[in-house]
Image: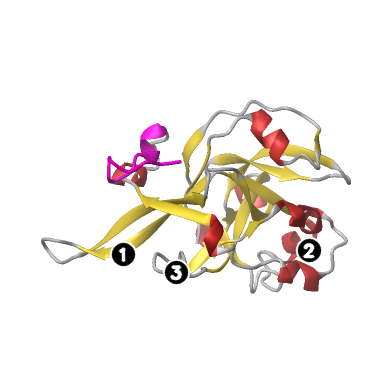
Amino acid sequence: MCGRYSLTKSLDDLASFFEAYELLQRPNLAPRWNIAPTQKSFVLRSPAPGKGELVALRWGFAGPNNAPLINARSETAASKPTFTEAFAKRRCLVPADSFYEWQAVEGQKAKQPQKQPWRIGLKGGGLFAFAGLWQSEPAYGGEECFTILTTAANDYLSPLHERMPVILPPERFALWLDPATPPGILQRLMQPYPAEAMARYRVTSVVNGVKVDGPECFAPLNPALKVA
């Protein structure tokens, strides 16, 4: 799954990353170290071929009792009523430079299950993009919202969690954003990202707090660890 992520790169970095799309606007982009559900974050939509718009949307579709649906299983999104129309017509890219996962570990004292947060990204620390969906939510007053698609975890991340976000390589951005891409091809894009391209390290529990959003979220649990 994907319950928190970061986007600390500059707007120029994003423009370079999405070089195939002429950005129609240049919004203010402040670094975010700990983006949490219901908060706003930027996604890229393509209103026309070769054009891109970076817009800040609320994270999470409206679910039962208006609980935010921050993730959608890629295997069933095309057929589930909550996501069907968005999967067919309103796809987006969610830029990030890392995401967090919590691994269940045994407590040393009380032998109670605990959660160890990990920061996960690409080797070298570069930008990447999740496959996302967006739509307007009447339950939130018509506010535009997004959700992140997930798939089975690769071998590198499966010890932490059985699911991972769908990360699309740049050469597949056009297929994902093109409204004419056939459903069968879209489904084939929903693959685990190559394990050998990814990196991870344990971080401190400071990231657990949804109101904490600073560089301290990236601090390794082991202070001697060199982080790219």
Instruction: Name the main secondary structure of what is drawn in magenta.
Output: loop
Residue picked out by circle 2: 88
- Label 1 crowd (10 A; few <14 / some 14-19 / many >=20): some
The verdict on residue 217 being magenta is yes
Which residue carries the number 1 mark? 104
Q: Distance between the residues labelled 2 and 3?
A: 29 Å
Tag of residue 151? none
User: Residue 40 appears at what percent x and percent y?
Assistant: 57, 39
Out of 32 and 71, give the one closest to the viewer: 32
Q: Which span is picked out in magenta?
A: 214-228
Task: Quote the CA–CA distance across marks 1 and 3.
Answer: 12 Å
Circle 2 packing at 10 Å, graded few (<14), some (14-19), many (20+), is some
Q: What residue type is labelled 2?
A: Ala
Q: What residue type is labelled 1?
A: Ala
What residue is pinned by disc 3? 158
Distance, label 2 to label 1, CA atoms, is 36 Å
Q: Residue at x 59, y 64 (%)?
A: 72
Q: Is mark 1 on a helix, strand or loop?
A: strand
Q: Where is residue 221 in the image (x, y as percent from the top left)?
A: 29, 46
